[in-house]
Every structure is written in C-alpha cells, then in structure tokens.
Image (cartoon, grey):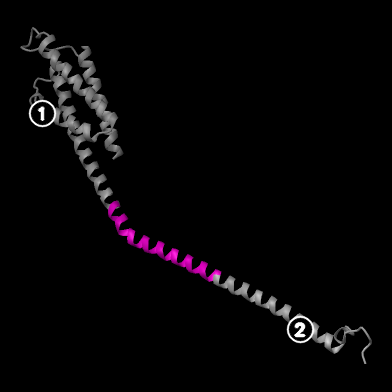
Amino acid sequence: MAAVGTHPRTRTRHGPVAGQWATAEQQTVAATRATRHHGNIRGGMVSGMDTSAIVTAVIAGIGLLTTAGAPLLQTRAAARHERDAHLRTERMRLYAEAMVFQQGFAEYLAWLVGDVLYDRTRESMGAAREDITGRMWLLAPKPALDAWLRLVVAGQEVAFHESEVWQPDPGFDRVMPPRTDPVIVAAEQALEQVRVLLRAQVDAG
C-alpha cells in the first residue's frame, strides 16, 4: 500500500515507473537532437553539392567561351601582324626612295657650287619630292617627317636663289654660289639630318 499523499509514479527516483518516464524523456530529447543533427548533415551535404555543381558549371562555361573565342583572337592577331608587316614594308620603300632623292639633291648642290660638271638629277627631283612628301605625311614618324620637310624648304630656297638672287659666274654661263653661302650651308645641314634620321628609322625596323 502506498503512503498517503504520495503519487505512485513519483514514489521513488529509482522505482520502475519513474525510471520508465525518465527513459522516455531522454529518448525524446535524443531523438530530437538526432533529427536536427541529421538535418544539418543533409543540409550541409546538399549545400556542398550545390556549390560544387555551380563551380563546375562556371568552369565549364569559361572553358567553352575560351575554346569558342580562340579562333577569333587568332584571326585578329594574324590580321594585326599582317597589317604591321605591310606598314613596315611601305615605310622601308619610302625611306629608300627618300635616300635616293637626298643623294640626288646632294649631287645637285655639288654641281651648283662647281664641284662637279654635270647635273644629272634636277629634272626628276620635283615629281619625286612631291610623291615622297605625301607618303611621309602618311607613314613616317614625326622626327623623320620634320627632317624631310626641312630638306624640302631648303631645296626651295636653293631653287629661288638660283633663279632670282645669285648672279652668273663670269667664267661660266650659270650661277655658281660659294659653298659658304648660308643657303647652301642650310641645305647641306638639312641633307645630313635626313640622312641620319632615315638611317635610324631603317635600323629600328
């Protein structure tokens, strides 16, 4: 018989009924924790799987873009290389023609001051000068262009003085200015500058 005022299930902490209640509560708590833990694990696995799949997809997409864009990049690079090679070729041809012109002008100055007897170049210099000047504006870097334009101006000064300023030499049927004439000196300096700058452009490629 149980004591008065004592509930049978709380009579003792170690009684069979109380033990059964404690075990059930513990099992409930344990089951709840296990469920949460399992959910966390599954959530982490799903999240990890989703992240891995996204990374894989991004890498695959980049690979496809790179593969698809490679031929286009190669085509552009080849076109740029071909254009640069053509430009170098045109510049080398221009520099060669300019060097031929300056050599002819130097011979003309030598004839003008009496160092040589025959002028073999004056007739063809005008057309060549205009053609080279136009291409210099299109193709040459500024230092080479500036030097060439100084030579053109010097040549015009020489032509003007030959026809309007210098007087014919008494012993010849033409003008023959001294080599020390400022116009002749300026022309020879312009020739040397063109020589040096064009040589540097050719060496630079």
How many marks do you count on the picture? 2
- Real-space CA distance between mark 2 and mark 1, rounded to the nearest whole angstrom: 114 Å
Q: Position of residue 142 (x, y in %)?
A: 28, 30
Q: Describe the element under mark 1 as helix, strand or loop.
A: helix
Q: Position of residue 106 (x, y in %)?
A: 17, 24
Q: Which residue occupies 18% across, 27% down?
A: 102
Q: Which residues are magenta?
A: 47-76
Q: Earlier in the sequence, mark 2 or mark 1?
A: 2
Q: Which residue occupies 48% across, 66% down?
A: 54
In the foreground, 91 or 53: 53
Tell me where residue 71 sits by quadrant.
bottom left
Tell me where residue 31 sits by quadrant.
bottom right
Q: Amino acid at mark 2?
A: Ala
Q: Describe the element under mark 2 as helix, strand or loop.
A: helix
* Predominant SS of the magenta segment: helix
- Label number found at residue 127: 1
The image shows residue 24, relative to residue 155, as above or below, that is below
Tell me where residue 186 sits by quadrant.
top left
Is residue 56 shown in magenta? yes
- Label number found at residue 24: 2
Q: Which residue occupies 9% across, 20% down?
A: 117
Q: Amino acid at mark 1?
A: Ala
Mark nearest the camera among 2 and 1 is: 2
Q: Residue furthest front?
A: 4
Position of 56 with respect to 86 (left or right) is: right
Q: Quadrant of the image for the N terminus?
A: bottom right
The image shows residue 33, relative to residue 193, as above or below, that is below
